[in-house]
Amino acid sequence: MSAPTPAPLRPALHAEDTLLARLLDGTYPPGSTLPAERELAASLGVTRPTLREALQRLGRDGLLEIRQGKPTRVLHPHEGGLRVLAHLSRHGELGRMVPDLLDLRAALLPHWVAQTADRDPQPLQAHLGSPPAESDDPNLPQTFTAFDWAFQTLAAHGSGNALAPLLLGAFAEVYARAGAIYFSDPQRRERSREHYRALHAALPLGPAAAEQVARSTSLDSLQLWEARRV
């Protein structure tokens, strides 16, 4: 039996994806304006209402400035909100984002871990006590990614900061992709197990000790990526 054929994208999603690729490859560079609706719809093979739906979605995500009665202006991706991250990760920017994600993690996670240690460390400590074991499972990088994401989620929620889970959640799709790259390397997986064990031991010692270990392990992850980049 042949493999099932993937379902085609809805016209609006197809238009959005094609437009996004053109924004990111420089066809429509930041600061430029898009062609008139009729011309753009024809180039995408969609109707004008379908095009407007795609434009609204890209405008919502901070990639376009839609002005009533004026040409639509292309914004720099950096002008967009956090939702732009997922778009960038799907279009060739992911490898360059990994060190930035690790750097941001090193800035935020230690504080969340310290607050969690001060408030209620038990859920986070229980999770860190059972990291994935090494195996020949081809899905092991994804397993590690899920485990590490759960670790960060517990720290964000445990911190008591209402914005921490919301900020972390904005990176969910990007991290799922980046984590699979990072944890594809056996040395990184083994080092992460060491990190989890160290954090597991530090949490009962109080906020200061937990924060120090979380910071050193986060910085070590960044150094390991730079030293063994795939």
Image (cartoon, rainbow, N blue to C red):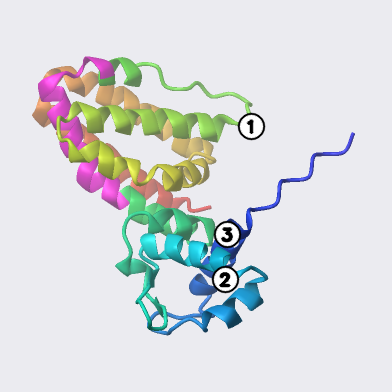
Badge 3 element? helix
Residue 15: quadrant of the picture: bottom right
Residue 49: quadrant of the picture: bottom right
Residue 75: quadrant of the picture: bottom left
Specify the label residue 138 is tagged with. Answer: 1
Query: Which residue range is magenta in the image?
Result: 103-123
Q: Which of marks 2 and 1 is in front?
A: 2
Q: Nearer the viewer, mark 3 or mark 2?
A: 2
At horizontal 39% and vertical 59% (from top left) the residue drawn is 84
Is residue 108 within the magenta segment?
yes
Q: Is residue 86 left or right of residue 214?
A: right
Q: Where is residue 61 in the image (x, y as percent from the top left)?
A: 38, 60
Badge 1 element? loop
Which corner quadrant holds the N terminus?
top right
Q: Give the mark nearest the N terminus, 3 or 2.
A: 3
Q: How far apart are marks 2 and 1 (CA)?
A: 45 Å
Q: Which of 82 and 96 is in front in this view?
A: 82
* For residue 86, above or below residue 207: below
Is residue 213 within the magenta segment?
no
Specify the label residue 48 is tagged with. Answer: 2
Q: Give the mark nearest the N terminus, 1 or 3.
A: 3
Q: Which amino acid does label 2 sit on?
A: Arg
Q: What residue type is labelled 1?
A: Pro
Q: Name the residue under label 3.
A: 12
At horizontal 42% and vertical 83% (from top left) the residue drawn is 71
Q: Position of residue 197 (x, y in %)?
A: 32, 23
